[in-house]
């Protein structure tokens, strides 16, 4: 019985949307909009929580800020892209978000209300979602 329960739990955890490129099971992507403004899109499947999608948005924002040598970021606009999907008579909730993000240099980071330090966000969230080889 324990093996059956363990196998079932392993199957469920394997179905959750992984952090990474947008694909069949969902994921996260970044698209440049204008200068230091980018759009982050994250989508999940029926096994993905809204909290996980929010953390994907934070992590991808931090990743993009650091990759482009910015100190932080601030959310400018947010659109809920959650979908309800009927699958064989079952209703599935598929969370999603599109967020406009402005990347900030060090001076802007300290002067902008509601801004996040990219390195702090990265250090807090990356260990949960990014596997090192």
Image: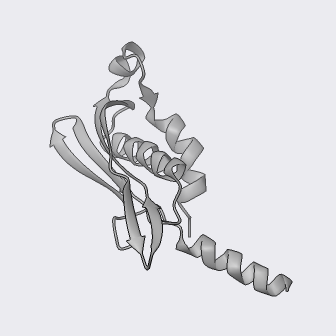
Quarter of the image where the C terminus is located = bottom right
Residue furthest top in the image: 111
Q: Residue furthest left?
A: 34
The outermost residue toward the right is: 1
- Please tell me which residue lies in front, 132 or 95: 95
- 16 vs 87: above or below: above
Decide: is 89 above or below 127.
below
Q: Determine whether, in the image, residue 87 is placed left or right of residue 22.
A: right
Look at the image and tell me whether residue 49 can be seen.
yes
Q: Is residue 72 left or right of residue 15?
A: left
Q: Is residue 27 visible?
A: no
Quadrant of the image for the N terminus? bottom right
Q: How many marks?
A: 0
Q: Residue at x 69, y 80 (%)?
A: 8
Residue 67 spot, x, y in % from top left: 34, 46
Which of the pair 94/63 is nearer the observer?
94
- What x and y, as percent, mark residue 11? 62, 79
- Residue visible at 51% across and 61% down? 48
Residue 128 placement (x, y as % from top left): 60, 55
Residue at x 33%, y 38% (from the top left corner) = 69
Tell me residue 113's x, y (percent): 40, 16
- Of the pair 93 and 19, the residue shown nearer to us: 93
Q: Colour scheme of this structure image? A: one colour
């Amino acid at each position: 019985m324990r093996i059956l329960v363990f196998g079932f739990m392993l199957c469920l955890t394997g179905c959750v949307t992984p952090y990474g490129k947008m694909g069949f099971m969902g994921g996260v992507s970044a698209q440049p909009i204008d200068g230091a403004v980018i759009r982050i899109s994250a989508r999940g499947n029926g096994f993905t929580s809204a909290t996980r999608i929010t953390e994907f948005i934070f992590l991808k924002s931090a990743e993009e800020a650091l990759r482009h040598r910015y100190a932080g970021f601030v959310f400018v606009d947010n659109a809920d892209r959650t979908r309800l999907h009927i699958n064989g008579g079952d209703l599935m909730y598929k969370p999603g978000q599109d967020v406009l993000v402005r990347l900030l240099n060090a001076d802007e980071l300290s002067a902008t209300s509601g801004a996040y330090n990219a390195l702090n966000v990265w250090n807090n969230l990356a260990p949960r979602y990014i596997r090192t080889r």
